[in-house]
Image: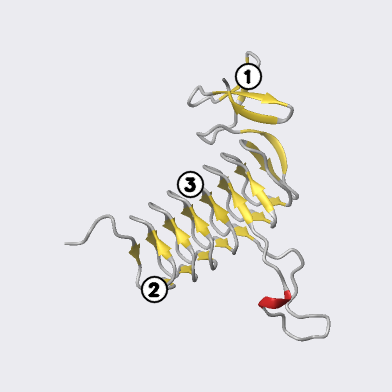
């Protein structure tokens, strides 16, 4: 009898021996999880997704099909990465050095994207490292993030800019009685000097 807490890896997936998969984590067809990557419990790695060396995913993360998460990205618990979204790692990308020799690992320094708890990155969005996506933030589909995104921010466009706030349920917040309110959960938030947080 199979242990239901064991991770599941499809036959066509490529998971390095040194990678760590948490309980109940699933890695689907043609996905690749590289050396030293650490995935928490209950993660779902979609078809063709890529998790780079030493990347860390918290519990309950979901990478949709063909999402690309390059090292040294760090994802907190409950992060959603949409289909074909990309988290980059090279500030000055080049295939060769000025003398024409191929670049090696010693010729550049990887920089990462950090994604806070519960945040979501929409389909085909690109997060250009270094950047931090705040907790519960929402990056719209197709957006290009070039700077840090505050907690609970809703950002859209190229380059991405904040157009509003979202609550933990992912819906845009509405202003009411001097607060920001989630129309789904009723949770209330306060904005102070451009920073949003739960109402005390």
Which residue, given by chain and number where applicable, does mark 1 sit on? 179
**Mark in front: 3 vs 1:** 3
Q: Secondary structure at mark 3?
A: loop
Q: Residue 193 or 180: which is nearer the viewer? A: 193
Q: Which mark is residue 12?
A: 2
State the residue in front, 115 or 166.
Answer: 115
Q: Are marks 2 and 3 in contact (CB under 8 Å)?
A: no
Q: Which residue is mark 3?
A: 77
Query: Between marks 3 and 1, how big is the CA–CA gap?
Result: 27 Å
**Which percent across, then down, holds residue 44?**
42, 55
Q: Quadrant of residue 165?
A: top right
> Residue at (66%, 63%) from the top-left corner?
89
Label 1 secondary element = strand
The crowding category of the residue bearing disc 1, from other C-alpha atoms within 10 Å (few below 14, some 14 to 19, many at least 20), is some
Mark 2 / mark 1, whichever is N-terminal: 2
Q: Earlier in the sequence, mark 2 or mark 3?
A: 2
Q: Is residue 71 above or below residue 140?
A: below
Instruction: Measuring from the top left, give residue 22's x and y in whole percent.
Output: 38, 57
Count numbered badges in the picture: 3
Query: Pointer 2 and pointer 1: residues touching (CB < 8 Å)?
Result: no
Figure quadrant of the N terminus: bottom left
């Amino acid at each position: 009898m199979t242990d239901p807490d064991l991770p599941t890896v499809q036959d066509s997936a490529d998971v390095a021996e040194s990678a760590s998969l948490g309980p109940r984590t699933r890695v689907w067809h043609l996905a690749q999880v590289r050396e030293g990557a650490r995935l928490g419990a209950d993660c779902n790695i979609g078809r063709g997704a890529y998790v780079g060396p030493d990347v860390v995913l918290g519990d309950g993360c979901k990478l949709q099909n063909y999402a690309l998460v390059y090292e040294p990205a760090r994802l907190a618990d409950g992060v959603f990465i949409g289909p074909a979204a990309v988290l980059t790692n090279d500030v000055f990308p080049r295939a060769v050095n000025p003398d024409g020799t191929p670049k090696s690992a010693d010729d550049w320094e990887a920089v990462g994207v950090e994604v806070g708890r519960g945040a979501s990155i929409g389909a085909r969005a690109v997060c250009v490292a270094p950047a931090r996506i705040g907790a519960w933030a929402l990056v719209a589909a197709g957006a290009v993030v070039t700077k840090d995104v505050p907690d609970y921010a809703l950002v859209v466009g190229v380059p991405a800019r904040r157009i509003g706030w979202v609550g933990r349920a992912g819906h845009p917040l509405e202003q009411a009685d001097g607060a920001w309110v989630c129309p789904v959960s009723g949770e209330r938030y306060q904005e102070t000097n451009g920073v949003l947080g739960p109402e005390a």
